[in-house]
C-alpha cells in the first residue's frame, strides 16, 4: 500500500444524515434526562452518603427503571402538590 491510498471503513446503516442526526439528538436528550433523574435521586440520599451508609443496589444505575422507581418514591412523592402533579405527568410520558 502506498502513502497516497486511503482506506475508508463505512457502516452502511441506510439512514440519511438527517435521520442519524435526529437519533443522536434523541439519545443525547434521553441521556441528559436519565442523568438528571439519577442526580435528583442520589441527592435524596445525602444523609446516607455523608454517614458512609450503603446506597440501594438500584443506584448502581445498571437499570434505569430501578432508579426511576426510587426517584418516584424519594423525589416525586415528597414534592409539594403542584410539583408532584407536574412530575407525575412527566413520569407518564417517560413510561409511554
Image (tube, helix red, strand yellow):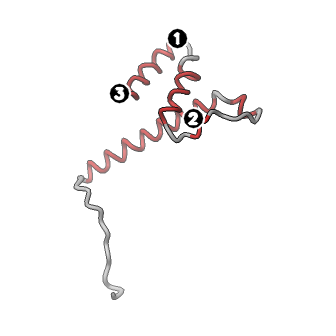
Q: Earlier in the sequence, mark 2 or mark 3?
A: 2
Q: In the shown orientation, is residue 13 left or right of residue 25?
A: left
Q: Which of the 4 image quarters holds residue 52?
A: top right
Give the foreground label among 2 and 3.
2
Q: In the shown orientation, is residue 52 left or right of residue 5?
A: right
Q: Residue at x 30, y 65 (%)?
A: 10
Residue 75: x %, y % from top left = 57, 23
- Which residue is most to the top? 81
Label 2 crowding class (10 Å Cα cut-off): few <14, some 14-19, many 20+?
A: some
Assign a secondary structure to mark 3. loop
Q: Earlier in the sequence, mark 1 or mark 3?
A: 1
**Would you say the residues marked 2 and 3 are in contact, meaning their CB atoms lie under 8 Å apart?**
no
Cα distance in 3D space between marks 1 and 3: 23 Å
Residue where numbered disc 1 is placed: 81
Cα distance in 3D space between marks 1 and 2: 26 Å
Assign a secondary structure to mark 2. helix
Give the foreground label among 1 and 3.
3
Label 1 crowding class (10 Å Cα cut-off): few <14, some 14-19, many 20+?
A: few
Residue where numbered disc 3 is placed: 96
Q: Earlier in the sequence, mark 1 or mark 2?
A: 2
Q: Residue at x 26, y 49 (%)?
A: 18
Q: Residue at x 53, y 20 (%)?
A: 76
Residue where numbered disc 2 is placed: 58
Give the foreground label among 1 and 2.
2
Cα distance in 3D space between marks 2 and 3: 21 Å
Amino acid at each position: 500500500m502506498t502513502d497516497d491510498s486511503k482506506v475508508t471503513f463505512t457502516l452502511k446503516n441506510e439512514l440519511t444524515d438527517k435521520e442519524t442526526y435526529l437519533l443522536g439528538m434523541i439519545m443525547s436528550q434521553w441521556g441528559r434526562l436519565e442523568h438528571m433523574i439519577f442526580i435528583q435521586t442520589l441527592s435524596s440520599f445525602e444523609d446516607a452518603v455523608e454517614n458512609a451508609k450503603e446506597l440501594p443496589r438500584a443506584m448502581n444505575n445498571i437499570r434505569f427503571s430501578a432508579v426511576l422507581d426510587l426517584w418516584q418514591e424519594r423525589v416525586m412523592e415528597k414534592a409539594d402538590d403542584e410539583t408532584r402533579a407536574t412530575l407525575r405527568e412527566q413520569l407518564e410520558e417517560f413510561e409511554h
